Image (tube, rainbow, N blue to C red):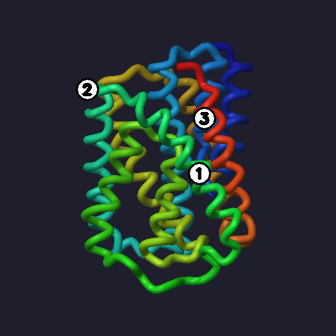
Amino acid sequence: MDIATVLLLFGVAVVAGCVDTIAGGGGLITLPALLMAGVPPAAAIATNKLQGTGGSVTATLFFLRRGAIQLQEHRLAVAMTFLGSMAGGWLVLQIDAAILARLIPLLLMAMGLYFALSPSLGAIDQPRRLSHGGFSLTIAPLLGWYDGFFGPGTGMFMALAFVGLCGYNLTKATAHTKLLNATSNIAALIYFMVFGQMYWLAGLAMFAGQLLGALLGGRLVLKHGALLIRPMVTVVCFALALRLLLAPP
């Protein structure tokens, strides 16, 4: 891969890291870019997980330093997300994910409408509907499994789970989403490093771009909160749903 293409992918990753930190869906930008750069599909998925890990881990560390994440309360959720993601990575090699490819776009469009038509959603903290333990043992591994098995829309599903079940406002939900997203990304990355094929130069260049984008996105989240997150989530949900619907079988 020539240096011009690598630099272009770096720039793409900066934009994707910012978008992903705010609303999720960064893979909507980076995976097509890798494919257009000539990376074979299987290697593109593995390389995309490498660069995406850079953004999610950077965003998590940023929110931790700013005190936006209660790590002690979510240690069990982190462990269960990790296990769920590993299980999803294993399962994707055993069965066909085509049924999810047909179902997920509809769920994403429904979620986009929900965020768009619920102006008070996530404006302030609400009472919890599920205990920390219940969330960690049921929802967290399910979200991790989905990310390892299929992936698109994981950030939006995580954010909605934190808002709807944990009662978090959107800013707090976004910060904790990056914690679980980083966990599932690391689990999947380990799996792909052992069993997959990486384009290391492109992946590491995009990893660096994701770091910059995630830092910018984290600052925007803490500064603008729900005013920025809600419309971004809505747009990304519909964009990702359309991409999945229009993608060739």
Mark nearer the N terminus (2 vs 3): 2
Looking at the rendering, which quadrant does residue 38 occupy? top right
Looking at the rendering, which quadrant does residue 242 occupy? top right
Q: Residue at x 27, y 57 (%)?
A: 80
Label 1 sits on a secondary structure element that is: loop
Separation (CA) of disc 3 from disc 1: 17 Å
The front one of 158 and 96 is: 96
Q: Quadrant of the N terminus?
A: top right
Mark nearer the N terminus (3 vs 1): 1
> Left or right: 100 with respect to 139?
right
User: What residue is disc 1 on?
Assistant: 24
Q: Where is residue 20 in the image (x, y as percent from the top left)?
A: 61, 50
User: What residue is disc 2 on?
Assistant: 94
Given the image, on which type of amino acid does mark 3 rest?
Met
For label 3, the crowd category at 10 Å Cα-Cα, with few meaning under 14, some 14 to 19 and many 20 or more, is: many
Q: Where is residue 86 in the image (x, y as percent from the top left)?
A: 28, 42
Q: Where is residue 132 in the image (x, y as percent from the top left)?
A: 32, 75
Q: Which residue is drawn at 66% across and 18% down?
A: 36
User: What residue is disc 3 on?
Assistant: 206
User: Which label lies toward us, 2 or 1?
Assistant: 2
Label 3 sits on a secondary structure element that is: helix
The front one of 72 and 236 is: 236
Q: Where is residue 22 in the image (x, y as percent from the top left)?
A: 64, 58
The image shows residue 16, relative to residue 173, as above or below, that is above
| Residue 80 in view here | yes
The numbered dot on residue 210 is none
Given the image, on which type of amino acid does mark 2 rest?
Gln
Looking at the rendering, which quadrant does residue 185 occupy? top left
Separation (CA) of disc 2 from disc 1: 27 Å
